[in-house]
C-alpha cells in the first residue's frame, strides 16, 4: 500500500458516517497523533461540514511536543516510553484538557521500518479514547512489521473503531 491511498474510499465513508453521527449527538472531537502524523485529523477533515465536529488535532511526534502541547509528564515518558499505554492515556486526556472537545483519541506507536525492539516491535501501536467527565479506554495492537504505510492505515482503522464504538454506545 502506498502513502497515496492510505485514505481510501472505505475510510472516507466511515469518517463521513462518524462525523454525521457526532454532529447529531453534539460531540466535538480532538485527535492526538504521533505515528500517524495527523492522518486521522486529515481523514476526518476530508468530510464537508466536519468543522461542526472537529475541534483540533495535535500532531505530537516528538516527546517534547507531547509534553508541551498535551501536558504528558516527562517522568511518564522516561519511565514507560512514548509508545506505551500510559502515554497514550496521557495524550488522549491531554487532548481533552487542551481543547474544547468532549471526545478524543490518541495514537502512539512504531510504524517502522526499524526502531523496534523485542519489547516494542515494529507495528506496536497504543490507542486511547478519552471523554470529558468520563473514563478513558485503552487499546494495544501489534500489527507486525507489515510496512510503514500499512501500520499507519491499520492505526487509522482502529482509531475510527474506538470513536465509532463511543458513538454507537450513545
Image: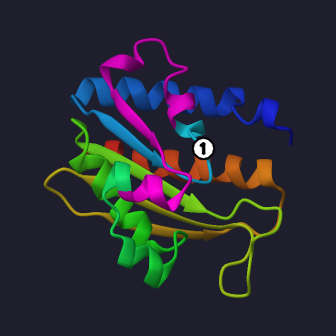
Classify the position of the C terminus by image quarter.
top left
Q: Residue furthest left?
A: 133
Q: Residue at x 33, y 26 (%)?
A: 53
Q: Which percent across, then down, holds residue 5?
A: 79, 31
Question: Is residue 73 highlighted in magenta?
Answer: no
Q: Quadrant of residue 98?
A: top left
Q: Residue at x 46, y 79 (%)?
A: 78
Q: Residue furthest bottom?
A: 118
Position of residue 136 in the picture relative to residue 46 (left or right): left
Position of residue 58 in the picture relative to residue 152 (left or right): left
Q: Quadrant of residue 75?
A: bottom left
- Give the labeled residue for mark 1: 37
Protein image colouring:
rainbow
User: Magenta residues?
Assistant: 41-67
Q: Residue at x 54, y 60 (%)?
A: 108
Residue toward you, 1 or 59: 59
Label 1's element? loop
Question: Is residue 50 highlighted in magenta?
Answer: yes
Amino acid at each position: 500500500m502506498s502513502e497515496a491511498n492510505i485514505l481510501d474510499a472505505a475510510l472516507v465513508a466511515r469518517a463521513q458516517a462518524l462525523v454525521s453521527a457526532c454532529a447529531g449527538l453534539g460531540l466535538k472531537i480532538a485527535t492526538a497523533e504521533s505515528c500517524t502524523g495527523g492522518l486521522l485529523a486529515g481523514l476526518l477533515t476530508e468530510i464537508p461540514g466536519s468543522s461542526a465536529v472537529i475541534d483540533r488535532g495535535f500532531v505530537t511526534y516528538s516527546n517534547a511536543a507531547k509534553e508541551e502541547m498535551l501536558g504528558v509528564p516527562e517522568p511518564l515518558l522516561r519511565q514507560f516510553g512514548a509508545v506505551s499505554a500510559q502515554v497514550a492515556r496521557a495524550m488522549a486526556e491531554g487532548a481533552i484538557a487542551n481543547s474544547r472537545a468532549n471526545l478524543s483519541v490518541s495514537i502512539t506507536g512504531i510504524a517502522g521500518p526499524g526502531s523496534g525492539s523485542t519489547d516494542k516491535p515494529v507495528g506496536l501501536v497504543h490507542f486511547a479514547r478519552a471523554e470529558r467527565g468520563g473514563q478513558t479506554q485503552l487499546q494495544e495492537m501489534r500489527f507486525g512489521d507489515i510496512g510503514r504505510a500499512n501500520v499507519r492505515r491499520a492505526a487509522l482503522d482502529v482509531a475510527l473503531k474506538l470513536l465509532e464504538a463511543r458513538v454507537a454506545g450513545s
